[in-house]
Amino acid sequence: MAEDTAIAALSFEDALKELERIVGRLESGDASLDEAITLYERGDALRRQCAARLDAAQARIEAIRTDADGRAAGTTPFAAN
């Protein structure tokens, strides 16, 4: 659980950078099997954290709705396709 807390404390950018380093290490093929498993598990936790941060950011994005005169009339939730 302490590792999950540490990952949750990372900014999106730091989590993504660490995830990229892990992917590079795994792709190099230089890690032992035990190290590769540990790296994969941490990478998966980082991926979930990044996805959660992106989902939260998307939920906050709003499109401005305008009235007939082109003035801002309010906001509507962002609808991603």
Image: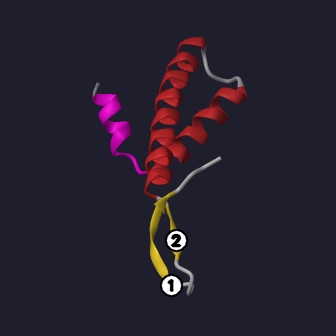
Residue span colored magenta: 2-11
- Location of residue 35 by image quarter: top right
In the displayed structure, would residue 40 be above or below residue 24? above
Residue most extreme to the top = 33
In the displayed structure, would residue 17 be above or below residue 67? above
- The answer to which of 8 and 64 lies nearer the viewer is 64
N-terminal of the pair, mark 2 or mark 1, is 2
Q: Identify which amino acid the numbered label 2 is placed on.
A: Arg
SS for dot 2: strand
Tag 1 residue: 71
Tag 2 residue: 65
SS for dot 1: loop
User: Is residue 9 one of those drawn in magenta?
Assistant: yes
Q: Identify which amino acid the numbered label 1 is placed on.
A: Arg
Give the percent coordinates (x, y) of residue 73: 45, 76
- Location of residue 5 by image quarter: top left
Residue most extreme to the bottom = 69
Give the percent coordinates (x, y) of residue 36: 58, 19
Residue most extreme to the right = 28
Q: Residue at x 66, y 36 (%)?
A: 24
Q: In the rendered view, how is the structure colored?
A: secondary structure
Q: Residue at x 47, y 61 (%)?
A: 76
Mark 2: few, some, or many residues within 10 Å (few <14, many ≥20)?
Answer: few
Instruction: Give the Cα distance between marks 2 and 1.
Output: 8 Å
- The answer to which of 73 and 42 lies nearer the viewer is 73
